[in-house]
Amino acid sequence: MKIIVIPGDGIGPETMSACYEVMMAASQRFGLGLELEHEIAGLESLNKRGATVTQELLEKVKTRDGLMLGPMSTYNYQDESKGEINPSLFFRKKLDLFANIRPSKTYPGMAKRLPQDFDLVVVRENTEGFYADRNVESGGSEMLITSDVVISLRRITRLCCERIAKSAFELAQHRKKHVTIVHKANVLKMGDGMFIDVCHAIAKDYPDVVVDDFIVDAMMAHVVRSPERFDVIVTTNMFGDILSDLTAELSGSLGLAGTLNAGKLYAMGQAAHGSAPDIAGQNIANPLSQILSGAMLLTWHGQKTKQTKFLTAAQAIEDSAAYLMLTKQVTPDVGGNLKTDSTARAFVNHLLTSYH
Ligand code: NAD
């Protein structure tokens, strides 16, 4: 399996280096034959190539089996005409990575934010919605009407609703068989009205899956009050982005939030969090989000190519993360006192000595 690895900005080089070590150890232990090829995007690419991401890089990624993308300081990218393009959006749009799968769960032994355990997945539509930057073929869909008036376009299409709903129901079939639709159809009557209708129509193909729905603002209360009642949560782009940061933090830390961006042909592993400039360069960022994203990419590839060794390796990575959490060999954000690099070493050590 050939994977392009892009460290990104801020804490990206630290967490991606840890992820690289763990994936190579998994390759060694499970005979995966991983070829991890280093590439650049973000500020390093802006300095060296004049753009944060390039068409040449996209073409290269298309010839490989997967992409690992580090976090980017996108808030600082102001002007696309100066090459300041959001690489995350770029790959999601150009590779049609419509499903952003964002699991959150509690781990035994970890200091808890809530008394109860939970295990849920937010399935977020990734290619349209309130993110005006991905709604039109070229340019953006934010308009400066006057210097005091801006319109940001929200796009909802039947096709995107259908395919994200299918992703959610497929996933639920292999979990607790429960899908929760999150929306704001009381206000966005047409867009979210269509989203709900499509989700319920797709649900008919999955009669053994229980379906319910919540308005997004009320959902914030429900998920804080009793996250254990949810299994798969399907929602539009921005609601999913916000909700999944909340569920990640409720599980212990944003630094635990591994995600996969998946389409029909391509997939990209990416942590849910950003470049965390407040802790960059300090060797204290939690690398587990990046590492768990890597495991999700291995699972995707294993399912696509029907090679169980990738599924076994991904499970071993997830189990190793749980072991590190239980034995407190983790970074300060989840109650440990290890550094980013020593967490990676402990991870590799467990992976290489515990699975035969
Ligand atoms: P952030 O997600 O980077 O950080 C939020 C908080 O979580 C900070 O306190 C940070 O220290 C902490 N945190 C994040 N990741 C952590 C980790 N692995 N371990 C421990 N703590 C962690 O959000 P922000 O500060 O609002 O954004 C910083 C930059 O990242 C901005 O430029 C933003 O646009 C960008 N961003 C990029 C992505 C992406 O590339 N996918 C996603 C979100 C934000």
Image (tube, helix red, strand yellow):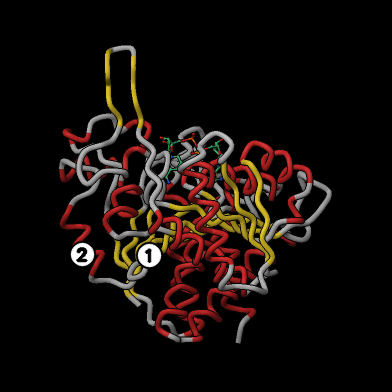
Is 334 left or right of 124, judged from the image as shown? right
Q: Is mark 1 within 8 Å of ligand 1?
A: no
- At x 64%, y 47%, the residue is 247
- At x 61%, y 79%, the residue is 353
Amino acid of disc 1: Gly
Q: Quadrant of the C terminus?
A: bottom right
Q: Residue 95: horizontal and vertical position, in percent?
A: 29, 60
For the residue pair 76 and 138, the one nearer the viewer reads as: 138
Looking at the image, residue 229 lies above or below residue 144: below
Location of mark 2 (residue): 60
Amino acid of disc 2: Lys
Please name which of the two marks, 1 or 2, marks the residue nearer to the observer.
Answer: 1
Q: CA distance from mark 1 to mark 2?
A: 17 Å
Is 281 left or right of 120, judged from the image as shown? left
Q: Earlier in the sequence, mark 1 or mark 2?
A: 2
- At x 51%, y 44%, the residue is 192
Q: Residue 328: horizontal and vertical position, in percent?
A: 72, 56
For the residue pair 87 and 170, the one nearer the viewer reads as: 170
Looking at the image, residue 128 lies above or below residue 176: above
Q: Which mark is residue 263?
A: 1
- At x 51%, y 39%, the residue is 189
Dot 1 crowding, Cα within 10 Å, few <14, some 14–19, many 20+? some
Q: Is residue 280 visible?
A: yes
For the residue pair 103 and 316, the one nearer the viewer reads as: 103
Looking at the image, residue 94 lies above or below residue 186: below
Is 206 left or right of 1, judged from the image as shown? right
